[in-house]
Amino acid sequence: MPAQRLDGAALAQTIRAQIATEALDVAKRLGRPPGLAVVLVGENPASQVYVRNKVKACGQSNIHSELIPLPANTQEAELLAVVAELNARADIDGILVQLPLPEHIDSHRVIEAIAPEKDVDGFHLSNAGALMVGRPLFQPCTPFGVMRLLEHAGTTLRGAEAVVVGASNIVGKPMALMLQAAGATVTICNSKTRDLSAHTRRADVLVVAVGRPHFIQADQIKPGAVVIDVGINRLPSGELVGDVDTTAAMSVASAITPVPGGVGPMTIAMLLENTMTAARRKTGVPA
């Protein structure tokens, strides 16, 4: 029986519709719409697409967005000054600095300059540390979206074996923490893990985020596993594919996210959710 397709695009649309309604209520309480500032440095084509999608999603969800494009030769001090100005603005609830930044800018320093209460990406050290103890202000958007997808699919995590392939600060590490907090027994691997298949074949839930097309094959998946493919890669033909060979995996897994249309839309939906959480805190209503 073919695997169930975990349609992140459809779930994200439902979440965004709920946010659009809630944003109107928050706007009445604040006297203004919830506000998100997006800072884009340079002209990275992929970043431009991501930012355009985020700004469009805000507009469809009754959230005010402000795009601040800066040239690639912007100096670190100039970018930090922009962040400081956004920190001080009462009409901006969330700040997102699109990564990656040009090599001459220290991305860690920039992230740390964002006020933790406006860090809707969830990357600030204060939020990362709070996530470790289970009390984050904001959860990083991609793993947050994965958790919502798993919840929507009715996946049982308590007691499950979960394997995360990819150990980045943006996806892999926070993903492992969230799965652990949900009661799963978690193994975190990377692309260089020895005998990776020995780990992946025992996973009830397999999350793959390494940025390599078709890195995981069907014979590396436990029959009946739930597979979350975070990767998105463009082949020379122009086709977008994930880190998992989806066509082959469909005959092994019980459920799998498509690429595109799986985790990507959920990442944007969770960015909007985090922005709403930031705005809601200002109303005095529990977030």
Image (cartoon, grey):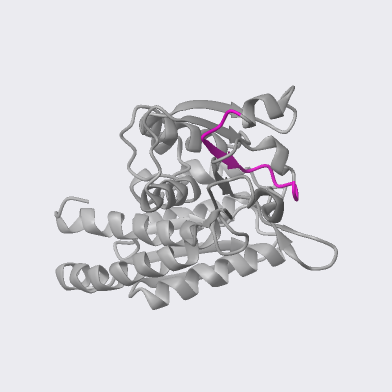
Please name whichever residue, 2 or 31, is drawn nearer the observer in this view of the structure: 2
Please name whichever residue, 167 or 216, is drawn nearer the observer in this view of the structure: 216
Indicate the quadrant where residue 71 lies.
Answer: bottom right
Residue 233's spot in the image, x, y percent? 72, 56
| x 17%, y 59%: residue | 283
Drawn side of residue 92 relative to residue 252, left or right: left
Drawn side of residue 189 relative to residue 277, left or right: right
Q: Which residue extends farthest front?
A: 1
Is residue 63 at least partly visible in the picture?
Answer: yes
Q: Which residue extends farthest right?
A: 236
| x 16%, y 73%: residue | 28
| x 49%, y 32%: residue | 176
Residue 229's spot in the image, x, y percent? 60, 49
| x 42%, y 36%: residue | 178
Residue range of the region highlighted in magenta in the rendering: 202-214
The secondary structure that dominates the magenta segment is: loop
User: Is 278 covered by the magenta stretch?
Assistant: no
Is residue 42 at least partly visible in the picture?
Answer: no
Q: How many dots with numbers?
A: 0
User: Is 205 covered by the magenta stretch?
Assistant: yes
Indicate the quadrant where residue 90 lies.
Answer: bottom left
Please name whichever residue, 15 or 70, is drawn nearer the observer in this view of the structure: 15
Residue 186's spot in the image, x, y percent? 50, 27
Q: In this view, does 31 lie above or below 213?
A: below
Q: Is residue 265 above or below residue 132?
A: below
Q: Which residue extends farthest top?
A: 194
Drawn side of residue 165 relative to residue 176, left or right: right
Residue 166's spot in the image, x, y percent? 63, 36
